[in-house]
Image (cartoon, rainbow, N blue to C red):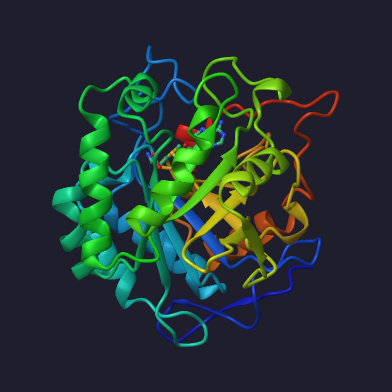
């Protein structure tokens, strides 16, 4: 039985009596929404470079209606992603509306955004003014040449660097930099990123490469594991572990021993954190995904288009979340890659 039950209010909206919970007892409070399937980069480990957007986008007011339903069921954090979210017309208006929403506790939503940073220089201030609190910028090398070999976009390194600095100056903090490491490709960047974190005043987080690419690249040998990253940085800049702020935190955090700066490592492959997962995703075309590695999608938008009201949609969200997978099976025999890759799910 769902733990939270939605009931109609006089305004015809949805009121939840307790939190959105799955059948494994995990409270789901974190929603990731892809607001476009388009991207202006063709990162070699993510996209083949031969195909563009694969899935449609909803109208901004449609995302808002769906997000509002999740919030009334207990979602307190919303992360906008894509594709590349900064390409999406209406983003500033969307953020403005999200900033006005309140959680079940009457608090503002925790609003975040994941971007490749290419357009951030001009957008950092407007995003902050609209209500965005913090941003995560993806950056897979601190060497300009390596970076542009990955993104396949000339000039991208300096554009992203300007974007990072603009975001920091605009107060989109803590500003996090996400770096996916691939052995033999950009794993030489590890130590450089440790320096970068301190010089730029950002939190660098290394992410283990997952089998979510458009092509067929992934193998366990390409993954640079958490233990190796920590050991390599520790050798040049001693690290001390930092206690997690909350159980569902994805990153294992380490501070530099001299107290200046921090790095994190997100290790879904070698240290899966599914047991504490608090996330659910909405794709750009309005499908719910209960896990990055789900084999099925749940067509919330289709139900909305068919005329279901907010109570019916809320009940569908609750039922769907109940069926959230216990864990992923990366690296196990019989592992099945999901039908959508990361860029089309929303990372
Ligand atoms: N365009 C935005 C960006 O670049 O941050 C948002 C979408 S992008 C798909 C989100 C994040 O997923 C990026 O940090 C990217 O590096 C990461 N990513 C893509 N494919 C991945 C994979 N197979 N394993 C781990 N992370 C991946």
Which quarter of the figure is the N terminus placed in? bottom right
Residue, x 38% and y 15% (percent of image)? 49
Instruction: Find residue 174 and report its image quarter.
Output: bottom left
Residue, x 51% and y 72% (percent of image)? 76
Residue, x 78% and y 57% (percent of image)? 275
Q: Is residue 305 visible?
A: no
Q: Is residue 235 visible?
A: yes
Q: Is residue 25 left or right of residue 118?
A: right
Q: Position of residue 28 (x, y in %)?
A: 64, 65
Residue farthest toward the right in the current orientation of the protein: 333
Please determine whether, in this image, residue 177 is positioned above or below residue 19. Answer: above
Give whichever of 53, 329 is nearer the camera: 329
Give whichever of 31, 146 is nearer the camera: 146
Instruction: Find residue 176 and report its image quarter.
Output: bottom left
Please determine whether, in this image, residue 263 is positioned above or below residue 141. Answer: below
Q: Position of residue 204 (x, y in %)?
A: 47, 51
Give whichever of 210, 253 is nearer the camera: 253
Q: Is residue 154 left or right of residue 103?
A: left
Q: Is residue 200 left or right of residue 15?
A: left
Residue farthest toward the left in the current orientation of the protein: 122
Q: Position of residue 318 (x, y in %)?
A: 65, 63
């Amino acid at each position: 039985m769902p733990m939270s039950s939605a009931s109609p209010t006089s305004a015809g909206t949805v009121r939840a009596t307790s939190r959105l919970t799955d059948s494994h007892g995990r409270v789901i409070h974190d929603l990731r929404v892809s607001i476009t399937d388009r991207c202006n980069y063709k990162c070699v480990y993510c996209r083949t470079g031969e195909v563009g957007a694969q899935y449609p986008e909803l109208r901004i007011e449609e995302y808002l209606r769906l997000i509002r339903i999740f919030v009334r069921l207990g979602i307190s954090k919303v992360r906008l992603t894509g594709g590349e979210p900064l390409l999406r017309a209406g983003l500033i208006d969307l953020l403005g509306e999200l900033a006005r929403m309140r959680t079940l506790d009457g608090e503002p939503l925790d609003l975040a955004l994941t971007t490749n940073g290419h357009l951030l220089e001009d957008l950092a201030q407007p995003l902050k003014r609209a209500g965005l609190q913090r941003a995560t910028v993806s950056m897979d090398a601190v060497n300009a040449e390596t970076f542009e070999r990955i993104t396949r976009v000339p000039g991208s390194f300096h554009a992203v660097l300007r974007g990072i600095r603009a975001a920091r100056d605009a107060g989109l903090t803590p500003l996090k930099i996400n770096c996916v490491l691939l052995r033999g490709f950009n794993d030489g960047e590890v130590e450089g990123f440790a320096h970068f974190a301190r010089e730029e005043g950002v939190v660098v987080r290394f992410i283990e490469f997952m089998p979510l690419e458009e092509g067929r690249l992934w193998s366990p040998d390409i993954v640079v594991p958490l233990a190796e990253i920590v050991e390599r940085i520790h050798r040049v800049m001693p690290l001390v572990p930092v206690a997690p702020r909350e159980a569902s935190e994805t990153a294992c955090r380490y501070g530099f021993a001299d107290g200046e700066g921090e790095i994190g490592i997100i290790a879904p492959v070698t240290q899966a954190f599914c047991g504490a997962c608090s996330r659910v995703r909405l794709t750009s075309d309005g499908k719910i995904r209960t896990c990055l590695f789900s084999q099925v999608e749940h067509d919330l938008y289709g139900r909305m288009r068919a005329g279901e009201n907010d109570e019916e949609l809320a009940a569908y969200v609750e039922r769907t979340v109940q069926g959230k997978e216990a864990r992923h099976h990366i690296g196990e025999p019989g592992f099945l890659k999901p039908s959508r890759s990361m860029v089309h799910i929303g990372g």
